[in-house]
Image (cartoon, rainbow, N blue to C red):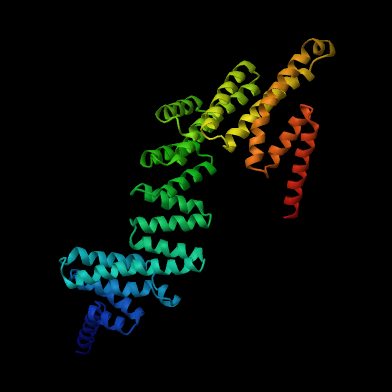
C-alpha cells in the first residue's frame, strides 16, 4: 500500500513539474510589465516551446517586446542576457507580421516596434557621432543593420563612418553591399575605387569606375580616374581611343585635351627610357599639340603650362646631355648645333613657366626651373630675380 502511494505521488510530482515547465505568455507579459526581464525571458522562451502558444501572433509579439527591452537596455547585466537579442526581437516582430492580418492591432504594433528598434540604434549612432565617438556610432549602425539588413541608408552611414575611422575593410563591405542592392551615391563609388587602388587591385578598380561612369555619365572624376587606371595598367591604346572619342564628341573640354597630352607625355618618357628617341619625339610632339589645344581653351591652365614648359626643358636636356657626352673632336663638329637646338627649346619653355609663376607666384619648383633656364640662356639679371623668389618662398615656408 505504501509503495503504491509513493508511485502515485511521484507520478503527480512529474506531472506538476512538466506542467510548470510549459511557461505562460501571460506570466511573461506580467514579468515584462514589472521590468523583470530575466524571468520574462525565461517564461516566454518556455511558453513558445508549446505549439499552442507558438501558433499565436500575440505570443511572438510579447517575445519581441521582451527581447527589444533586453537589446536596448543600458544595463550591461540585462543586455548580456542574450547576445542575439536584437535579431531575436526583429525576427519575433517579423513573425507577427507574417501570422496576423495586416490591419490587426498586434500586427500594427509589431511593425511600429520593429521600426522603433531600428530607430533606437540609429538615434544612438547619431548621438555618438555628434560626440565624435565614431566607434560607438559604427557599432550602433551595425546593430541597426541586424534589424534591417537591407536598409540602404544604414549601409551608407555604416560605410561612411567606417571610412572616417580608416577601417577600409568595413567601409568596403558596406558600400559593396549597398552597390549590389541599390543605386549608390557617387561618393561611395569614388571611395570603392580608392580602396581598390590603395590595395593595387587596379583591374577591380577599373571595373568599378566603368560601372560608375555608366550610372553617372556627367561625373568627370570617373572619366579621369578610368584613364589614369588604364595608363597604370598599361592599356594605353584603349586610353587613347577613349580620349579621342571624348574629344570628337566635345572638343571644348579642357581636361580631355590635358589627359591626352599627359598620355602622350608619359609615352614619350617611356620611349626615352627604352632608348627609342624617334618614337619618343613623335609622342612628345603629340603631347605638345594637345597641351597647346588645352591652353588655347584656357590660357592660364596650370597643368598645361607647367607640363608643356617641362617637355621643352626635357628636350633641351637631351640635346645638352648628348653634347656633353661627346669627345672634343666630335663636339667641335656637332656640339654647337645641339646646343643651339637646346637653346631653342629653352626659349620655347620660357613663356610657359613665366605664365605659371604669374598665376601661382609661390610655386618654388617653377621659379627654380625659371632660374635654370635664365642661366642657360645667359639672362643673368632675370636668373638672380628668380633665385631671390626661390629664397623668399623657402624662407616663408621655413618660418611656418
Q: Measured along the vertical axis of the image, is residue 66 above or below residue 248?
A: below
Using the rendered image of the protein, determine whether residue 165 is visible from the camera's viewpoint: yes
Where residue 314 appears, as percent x and y from the top left, is 68, 26
Which quadrant, please, contains the N terminus? bottom left
Quarter residue 118 falls in = bottom left
Q: Is residue 190 left or right of residue 278?
A: left
Where residue 113 appears, as percent x and y from the top left, is 28, 70
Q: Measured along the vertical axis of the image, is residue 114 above or below residue 276?
A: below
At 42% from the left and 31% from the top, the residue drawn is 250
Quarter residue 284 falls in = top right
Q: How many labels were placed on the picture?
A: 0
At 56% from the left and 29% from the top, the residue drawn is 291
At 48% from the left and 26% from the top, the residue drawn is 240
Where residue 27 appears, as percent x and y from the top left, is 25, 82
Using the rendered image of the protein, determine whether residue 45 is visible from the camera's viewpoint: no
Which quadrant, please, contains the C terminus? bottom right
Towards the viewer: 378 or 113? 378
Amino acid at each position: 500500500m505504501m509503495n503504491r502511494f509513493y508511485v502515485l505521488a511521484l507520478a503527480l510530482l512529474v506531472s506538476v513539474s512538466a506542467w510548470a515547465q510549459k511557461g505562460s505568455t501571460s506570466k511573461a507579459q506580467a514579468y515584462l510589465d514589472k521590468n523583470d526581464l530575466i524571468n520574462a525571458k525565461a517564461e516566454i522562451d518556455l511558453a513558445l516551446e508549446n505549439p499552442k502558444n507558438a501558433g499565436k501572433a500575440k505570443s511572438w509579439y510579447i517575445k519581441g517586446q521582451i527581447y527589444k527591452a533586453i537589446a536596448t537596455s543600458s544595463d550591461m547585466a540585462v543586455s548580456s542576457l542574450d547576445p542575439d537579442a536584437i535579431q531575436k526581437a526583429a525576427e519575433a516582430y517579423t513573425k507577427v507580421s507574417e501570422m496576423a492580418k495586416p490591419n490587426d492591432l498586434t500586427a500594427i504594433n509589431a511593425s511600429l516596434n520593429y521600426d522603433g528598434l531600428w530607430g533606437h540604434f540609429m538615434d544612438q549612432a547619431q548621438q555618438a557621432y555628434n560626440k565624435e565617438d565614431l566607434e560607438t556610432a559604427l557599432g550602433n549602425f551595425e546593430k541597426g543593420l541586424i534589424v534591417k539588413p537591407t536598409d540602404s541608408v544604414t549601409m551608407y552611414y555604416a560605410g561612411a563612418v567606417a571610412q572616417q575611422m580608416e577601417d577600409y575593410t568595413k567601409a568596403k563591405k558596406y558600400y559593396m553591399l549597398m552597390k549590389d542592392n541599390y543605386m549608390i551615391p557617387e561618393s561611395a563609388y569614388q571611395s570603392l575605387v580608392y580602396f581598390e587602388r590603395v590595395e593595387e587591385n587596379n583591374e577591380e578598380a577599373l571595373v568599378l569606375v566603368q560601372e560608375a561612369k555608366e550610372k553617372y555619365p556627367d561625373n568627370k572624376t570617373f572619366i579621369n580616374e578610368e584613364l589614369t587606371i588604364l595608363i597604370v595598367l598599361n592599356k594605353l591604346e584603349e586610353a587613347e581611343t577613349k580620349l579621342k572619342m571624348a574629344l570628337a564628341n566635345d572638343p571644348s573640354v579642357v581636361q580631355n585635351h590635358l589627359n591626352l597630352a599627359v598620355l602622350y607625355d608619359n609615352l614619350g618618357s617611356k620611349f626615352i627610357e627604352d632608348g627609342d628617341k624617334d618614337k619618343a619625339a613623335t609622342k612628345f610632339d603629340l603631347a605638345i599639340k594637345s597641351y597647346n589645344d588645352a591652353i588655347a581653351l584656357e590660357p592660364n591652365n596650370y597643368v598645361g603650362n607647367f607640363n608643356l614648359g617641362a617637355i621643352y626643358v626635357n628636350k633641351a636636356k637631351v640635346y645638352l646631355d648628348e653634347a656633353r657626352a661627346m669627345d672634343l673632336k666630335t663636339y667641335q663638329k656637332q656640339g654647337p648645333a645641339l646646343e643651339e637646338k637646346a637653346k631653342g627649346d629653352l626659349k620655347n619653355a620660357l613663356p610657359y613657366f613665366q605664365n605659371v609663376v604669374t598665376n601661382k607666384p609661390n610655386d618654388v619648383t617653377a621659379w627654380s626651373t625659371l632660374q635654370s633656364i635664365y642661366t642657360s640662356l645667359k639672362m643673368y639679371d632675370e636668373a638672380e630675380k628668380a633665385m631671390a623668389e626661390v629664397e623668399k618662398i623657402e624662407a616663408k615656408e621655413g618660418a611656418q
